[in-house]
Amino acid sequence: EEDATVELGPPEDGVLDTNSKLYSWGRGLQSLHDDSDDRIPASDQDDDKRNTQLMQVSTRLDSKSILHSACATYHSACATSRGALYVVGKNVHGCVDPNSPEGEIIAHPMLLDCISHIRVVQVSCGYDHTAVLSSNGSVLTWGSNLHGQLGHHVNGNQKVQHTDYQGPTNCRPTGMALGKGRRASSIACGTNYTLVLTQHMSLLVCGIPSIAGHRDASKWGLPQEIPSLVGLPLVGISAGDGHAAVVTAHGTAFVWGENRNGCCARDFPKTLTLPVPVKAPLPSSQSASNSRSMVSDDIAIQHVACGLEHTILVTRSGDLLVCGSNYRGQLGIDASKLQSTSKIVQVQHPKGGKFVSADAGNGHSLVLDSAGDVWVTDTNGLNCIIEGKSVLAIAAGGDDNCIAIASAPTGSKSLQRQFSMEMPEDTKSIVDAVDSLLEEMETNENSKKHAGQEIAEKSEELLQYPSVLNLILNPMKLEIMFERILCAGDVATRQTVANAIERGMKLGLESLRGSRMIYPEAVRCLLSYIKFFSIRRDEEIVFDVRGEAIFLFCDTILGIPFEGYRALHDFATNLYPRNLFVKMLVRPLLLTLNACTKFTTDENEVEHFSSSRQAVPVIVAVLSWLHAMAEEANLADPTDFYSDGVSKMNTESLFDDLYKMKNASPHEKSKNFYLCAHPFLLSPSCKRNLLQMEFQVEMFKAMMGDVNFSASTNEIKVEPFYQLEIEREHLVEQTLERIKQADPKDIRKRLRVSFKGEEGIDAGGVTKEFFQLLSEELFDVHSGLWSNKYGDDLNWFNSENTWDEKGYELIGILFGLALYNSVLLDVRFPLAAYRKILGLPLGLEDIMDEELRKGLKQLLDYPGDDVEEIFCVTFELTWMELGEERRLELKPDGANIPVTNENREEYVLRYVRWVLVDSIQSQWDSFQTGLMRVMEDSSLDLFLPEELELLVVGTPELDFAALQTNTKYEGGYDEDSDVVKNFWTFVVKDASLETQVKLLKFAAASTKAPIGGLGKMDFIIQRAGPDSSNLPTSHTCFNTLLLPDYGSDYDKLKKLLGRAILECEGFGLE
């Protein structure tokens, strides 16, 4: 049942023959001319008329419209437009007529009656076997099956037990076992093997192992795909004596087999067991950098022909690229000048025309040009043998056998066929068909259901065959088509299309299993598949519920060899601009990841996860690869990779994952999956929550490590806090003194601050104000700790301060304490400081001095070769410090080493290192020592520098409208209360930015918004009694504003609230 069935019946009625002219020459017994004479045309151009008469067949074949022809060493054949097959030659192993005796010579073209039940559209002749392609895509083969070249099923009583099994000869015409659903579009027979190109652009091969590959004995003789060619959009095939070749739709040729005389375009090895691309010389207009993404017409191949020991490639620009043996001039080059070549040599049309196709025999080649003239090779090179006859097709084989088919004087320029053959649809026609159907759906209400079903079928077909999908070069075209499909029709129609897409993806990806996707044109489809996971955007449809399609996709992409990864990298970075990279590659996978991490909680608080959760590790692995690519080529922002699904997971579960990862051995890390090992997926808020939970665990450990037992009272004493009592008037001095005296283990407890003389209890608010006040003094640029080179808005370590290294250590401790206790600091570190905290490398972009940065970049970008003369700098720096000139050599004897074109990168590297690292090394080491006293072993490495900055200082953008949306009300207030409406009118519309900042400081003891903005901050407005002249107050520990009910009196609220936020300071107890 897997064999393709043949199509019966007579030709279609009402269609008449259009005769063609058949020209045949070469060995008489093996050629199509109707006699046994050898016909050898003269090479002299003056003999053109005599040659034409000599070669033209004037027998019964002359009255036929010839559709296709082929010739080989012992026999030739041709198919007529009515589907009949004529054969001629020596019946070696039954290759001509299996019903005739072995070795019988059939001297005249004979109609092969035993296959009259099919309509032949193509024929190919091997050494001792023949293959024909029928109009319905089935392939029949006969002759010798000694090496399995016929592709027949082995009978049950002939089960193969070993790989060196030899099959029978004189086999009758039988359908090749192409496999279920496969139909052929082209065939080619070589010596002891057969190539079949399917209608969906894949290649099936059977026969000798050097071409078909080694396989299990159970699959002996069956047509199989070659793993390294799977996925390639193949459009042309050619079979030589011992080597074969294929051509892709994008113009790349692949060859393999016996590499005699360099016919596979390389010196070695002698036998190529895997297809390799033919490396044609790049034209000057095409750089090597984009050679994987596209091929110029100068080297793009449109046709290939394999001979005994040579190969002919025809480019789209109309030239020949040749290699192999040339002892008889078969490469189109004078044999006296070149005997053979393993390098590709270009041969141009002698008259400036364009070649369109070629075929090859043992020691000769036949070439057709765009004018319909035929050129044959001899020892002198190319010779025009048929001119002005509008030849449409050629064939060559054996020793000097040649066939040319020309249209009749009144005939069409294309060969006529009297029946309908379903030719393979290329991607363009499939995409165009989808576009037409979408137009029909949008304009014709009555055809929506029918058009939707057809769209589903076409979509499934496109995705089912990776080779066809690989024809889509422009990602934008795929994007537009998909977006239209996603919006087409009602829910039922979209669900039908979604089901078809899921089926097609599974079948297509399954077909790639076991393949070796090492070539660029094969792997491109993997990027195209990603877009179709965006169908999850439509919440009304169900797609890939079990995660089978996404798991199959990720498993496929993670299993490709390094060459495939490199090709995918090139395609993704060259063909996908920044907006498409995120939209077509990143977001579909994030949507799928979000669906796979989704969970529900029942009434017993038990979590139930999606059945597709098994796919999470492989999805994350693919996203990691895309993330690395995006970082390298600047194709996306960090926010583009945040996963809502991962960030919304239970914090305890994520922390458990983090804890296990940090405590795992290297071996355990290599074999287990940890979600927190991919922090680029976590939003800053999620990372903050994880860090806070980690700090809570450390605080608990520190508390439990300070448990004391009193024998006298028989009590256990626990001190959970690190108590810090400070006078406001001596804030900095007393704080630094207390920190110096503190026990290291106490610093790891939760901080509790109190101001002497104030009765407020610190539940967080006092600590926030403490750090706010401390920041204003410690991070004052004029304190001497910070450089004044960059103005008042930047804190950078003062390299001239060598007298207060202990002060930097204390600042590091306080910096760490603020992080440890989740308090924002008013510090203005540049991003370089956060990069240093995280241990990340620094570069020219981190230089704070804009003029210096521009100057160094100008030095690097200077295009001339006279850097030394133009810039006049050496590896010595000079600057003024305290009125004195200082000098520093960036390398030994730097004052005498000029900066040149060759060493300017070294100069910039050393300069940047000195500015950002070496000049402040002692100050930074002290700061880092203090910071690590608090933050040692913390998970700061989860954060990016930009995210760490948000964690430390918050965001300066204050969106009070977002805060209004997130605010809760207590004590009888709601959002419709008059005083509440007046409050938000004042804050959002009337208050200045300065007033807004002071309000935030008054209510929450902070001048910045936390990670995520004010919309993520818990804020409460609580009723503080009836209308009165009392000022509003606050509980900064809980971000609560206590607001008396001033009713609808807006002016009163504005006056009293303004006084409160401008004049009130300190803490008290009522």
Image: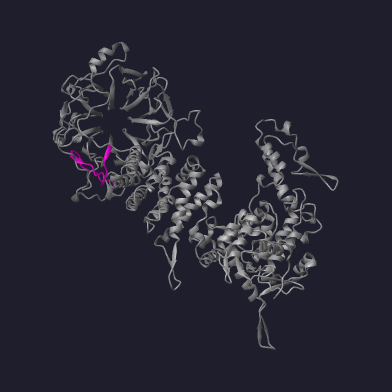
Tell me the quarter of the picture where residue 143 sits: top left
Against 452, is 117 above or below?
above
Where's the C terminus, which quadrant?
Answer: bottom right
Against 575, is 1045 above or below?
below
Residue furthest out toward the right: 883
Q: Main secondary structure of the magenta part?
A: loop
**Percent x, y for residue 1039?**
63, 66
880 to the left or right of 674: right
Question: Can residue 164 be found in the magenta stretch?
Answer: yes
Against 258, is 713 above or below?
below
Residue furthest out toward the front: 1049
In this rendering, the count of numbered labels is 0
**Foreground of the two, 173 or 17:** 17
Residue furthest out toward the top: 46
**Percent x, y for residue 523?**
42, 44
| Residue located at (80% from left, 67% from top) | 729
Question: Can residue 776 be found in the magenta stretch?
Answer: no
Numbered range of the magenta stretch: 162-185
Is residue 935 in sight in this rendering? Answer: no
713 to the left or right of 388: right
**Percent x, y for residue 902?**
67, 36
